[in-house]
Image (cartoon, rainbow, N blue to C red):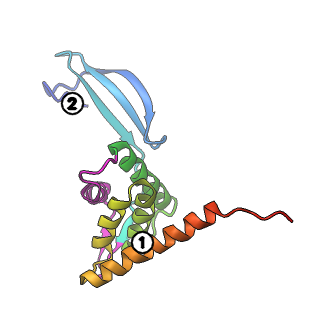
Amino acid sequence: MRCPECDATENRVVDTRASRGGRAVRRRRECTVCGARFTTYEYVEERPIQVLKRSGAIEDFDRTKLLRSVKVACAKRPVSAHDMEAMIDEIEDQFSRQAGVEIPSVKLGSLVMGGLGPIDRVAYVRYASVYRNFQDAGEFQEFVDEMDSADTLEEQRRNQVELPI
């Protein structure tokens, strides 16, 4: 590893920990030349996950691109960076178990929506508005109405009192 301060290659490992649910190793290093400390992450090289786009094009899965889209949906909402990272980690874990397979972008989008729903409803609706590509306000309103009716049914189910036999 090269020191980010002085570009020297002589350094020592100060601390080693598992990171990202055991999928990475985090190492704190100290440069023996200038004394600067820096962090490195080591990952197992896996077969790339590929995403099959709606247009038929295939591209490699890009975690940063997905995280960026989730951050846009969660902008100015009370959603922590940790929650977003954990959701993306879970999605990535699901896909990495199927390594070597092309994942349809539709499935990826629905998994993100499924992850955003319990975290923040506004972020969920924001993401859905882009993912579902609504063409007019009527389609958007139908989506919101469906969400509200599903929530009402869920609330009724939770509050339903069982009758004694």
Above or below, 33 against 113 in this view is above
For the point 52% across and 59% down, which residue is it? 97
Q: Quadrant of residue 143?
A: bottom left
Q: Quadrant of the N terminus?
A: top left
Above or below, 134 against 81 in this view is below
The magenta stretch spans residue 75: yes
Q: Position of residue 160 (x, y in %)?
A: 66, 64
Element under disc 2? loop
Taking 87 as reference, is 98 left or right? Answer: right
For the point 21% across and 30% down, which residue is it? 2
Q: Position of residue 105 (x, y in %)?
A: 36, 72
The answer for how far apart the CA atoms under marks 2 and 1 are is 35 Å
The residue under label 2 is 2
Whichever of callouts 2 and 1 sits on the residue coming sooner in the sequence is 2
In the depicted view, which residue is nearer to us: 124 or 42?
124
Q: Position of residue 28 (x, y in %)?
A: 33, 25
Q: Residues within 10 Å of mark 1 (few under 14, many from 20)?
A: some
Q: Which residues are magenta?
A: 52-79
Label ID, residue 31: none
